[in-house]
Image: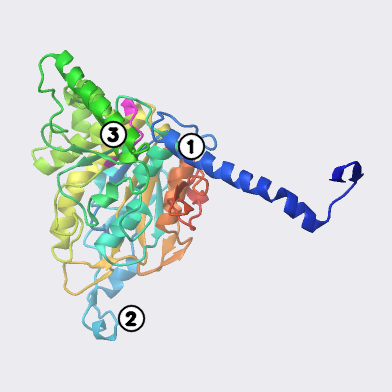
């Protein structure tokens, strides 16, 4: 019953009257929802562990970034048709001036079937070939542009433009770190910034505490990790003074994310100084384990990449949520960017990475960690099945290969396909949006619900795109 005037009641309201008397109520509902979003964002920026949206298959991610673009037709996607056409004119270009100036190029490396699944792998990767029964190989990835900077940014952030949070930052935001004394997102770097810049590892518009912590490949992993003050009480006093000054400054600004993040970074750095050297001390590993990763190699770049892969396992084991491993320095626009010297370049890069990544998979499996650790192997695009010369390939986003292992993925499967020449993804075509949605799904995160309010709308890693690739989910 509603009261329409003193002493009189009636049973119903017209629609016009209903909207008039309830307008403020609708406004309050909208306001409360907006405030809840902001409160959740502020709370999550400093929390340690957050609940996933649904039961997770994976707890952690190790991303092996193959920058520059691995040739899919020389690695995991054999094309016998190229053997027939090798050296013949390429006449299928959309650019008429290119037709006749390029030649089809067969793979310099033979393929053989491996594992119970009988999956073909190039001789470039003899160690990974022994792990194919643990891989979910996606042959139908498609990117936007044949440009390194935009491709690398798209792979890392879901956008061709700088300013968006990295995949690792979104994972850290969504789940937090399992160890309050270690960052949730770590990049193991060889000191070379990939195309697209440090924006690839940025927190973007997420709170600054979610950006990557950069660990160096050679020598001490973090500058100034050892305290300069011999007396810990002196260091604690300095940190206390900094915390007090920053807190007062932040409050004067009305709680500033940059200052709050600086406070948390000081505190994290203080806790890391005793834990990081221990976690990354590979002397605690047996000689057999180090040899599995190729750390006993006489090739410096292979030894360093093996060191990074073993460090990644130890960081994941210690509770770091997301670890990215970059490649040793190579070509100017990415390690695998062989427009010329394809054979020498790809063989050098495979030597550096093949044994270490295979060792990582085997080590995780032996320790019972592969079931809950998702390993991702991907670059920004593939390389052309044709060439302007006889020993090089160019950028090719129209169809290429990435693979996943562990963390709730199917094992020993091939998903999607390119055409008989490797020119176009034609079956179960996938995008980086789909890859990101799948990674989040395996971590128990719904890519449509993992959002952050920015610029007047709810932002997400996959923007308004992305479908989980259920064909690779166990």
Q: Is residue 259 left or right of residue 339?
A: right
Residue beneath disc 3: 249
Q: Quadrant of residue 424?
A: bottom left
Q: CA distance from mark 1 to mark 2?
A: 52 Å
Who comes first in sequence, dot 3 or dot 1? 1
Q: Nearer the viewer, mark 3 or mark 1?
A: 3
The answer to whether the residue labelled 3 contacts the one labelled 1, judged by CB atoms less than 8 Å apart, is: no
Regarding mark 3 in the picture, which secondary structure is present there?
helix
* Residue 429: x %, y % from top left: 46, 62
Residue beneath disc 1: 39
Mark 3: give few (<14), some (14-19) or many (20+) Cα within 10 Å. some
Q: Who is closer to the viewer here, 163 or 347?
A: 163
Q: Who is closer to the viewer here, 185 or 372?
A: 185
Q: Is residue 233 magenta?
A: no
Q: CA distance from mark 3 to mark 1?
A: 21 Å
Q: Is residue 180 left or right of residue 439?
A: left
Q: Nearer the viewer, mark 2 or mark 3?
A: 3
Regarding mark 1 in the picture, which secondary structure is present there?
helix
Residue beneath disc 2: 94
Up/down of 243 relative to 231, above or below = below
Q: Residue furthest bottom?
A: 96
Q: Quadrant of residue 352?
A: top left
Q: Which residues are magenta?
A: 317-324
The answer to whether the residue labelled 2 contacts the one labelled 3, judged by CB atoms less than 8 Å apart, is: no
Regarding mark 2 in the picture, which secondary structure is present there?
loop
């Amino acid at each position: 019953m509603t009261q329409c005037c003193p002493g009189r009641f009636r049973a119903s309201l017209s629609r016009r009257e209903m909207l008039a008397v309830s307008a403020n109520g609708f406004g309050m509902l909208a306001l409360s929802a907006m405030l809840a979003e902001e409160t959740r964002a502020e709370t999550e920026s400093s929390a340690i562990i957050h609940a996933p949206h649904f039961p997770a298959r994976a707890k952690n991610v190790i991303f092996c970034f193959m920058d520059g673009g691995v040739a899919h037709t020389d690695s995991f996607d054999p094309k016998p048709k190229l053997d027939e056409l090798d050296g013949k004119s390429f006449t299928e270009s959309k650019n008429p001036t290119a037709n006749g100036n390029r030649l089809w190029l067969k793979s310099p490396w033979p393929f053989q079937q491996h594992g119970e699944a009988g999956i073909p792998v190039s001789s470039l990767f003899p160690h990974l070939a022994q792990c194919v029964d643990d891989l979910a190989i996606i042959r139908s990835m498609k990117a936007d542009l044949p440009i390194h900077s935009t491709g690398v940014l798209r792979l890392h952030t879901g956008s061709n433009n700088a300013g968006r949070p990295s995949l690792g930052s979104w994972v850290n935001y969504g789940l937090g770190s399992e160890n309050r004394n270690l960052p949730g997102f770590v990049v193991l770097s060889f000191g070379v910034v990939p195309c697209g810049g440090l924006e690839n590892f940025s927190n973007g518009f997420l709170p600054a505490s979610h950006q990557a912590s950069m660990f160096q490949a050679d020598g001490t992993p973090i500058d100034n990790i050892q305290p300069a003050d011999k007396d810990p009480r002196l260091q604690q006093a300095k940190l206390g003074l900094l915390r007090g000054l920053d807190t007062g400054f932040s409050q004067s600004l009305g709680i500033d994310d940059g200052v709050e993040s600086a406070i948390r970074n000081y505190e994290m750095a203080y806790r890391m100084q005793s834990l990081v050297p221990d976690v990354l001390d590979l002397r605690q590993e047996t000689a057999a384990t180090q040899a599995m990763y190729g750390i006993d190699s006489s090739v410096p770049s292979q030894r360093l990449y093996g060191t990074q892969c073993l460090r990644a396992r130890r960081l994941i084991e210690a509770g770091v949520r997301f670890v990215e491993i970059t490649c040793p320095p190579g070509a100017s626009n990415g390690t695998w960017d062989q427009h010329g010297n394809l054979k020498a370049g790809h063989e050098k890069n495979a030597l550096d990475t093949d044994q270490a990544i295979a060792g990582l998979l085997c080590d995780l499996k032996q320790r019972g960690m592969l079931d809950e650790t998702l390993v991702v192997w991907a670059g920004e695009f593939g390389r052309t099945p044709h060439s302007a010369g006889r020993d090089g390939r160019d950028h090719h986003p129209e169809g290429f290969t990435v693979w996943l292992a562990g963390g709730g993925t199917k094992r020993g499967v091939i998903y999607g396909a390119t055409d008989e020449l490797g020119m176009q993804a034609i079956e179960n075509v996938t995008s980086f949006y789909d890859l990101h949605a799948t990674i989040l799904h395996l971590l128990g995160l719904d890519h449509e619900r993992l959002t952050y309010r920015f610029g007047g709308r709810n932002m997400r890693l996959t923007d308004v795109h992305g479908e989980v690739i259920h064909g690779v989910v166990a």
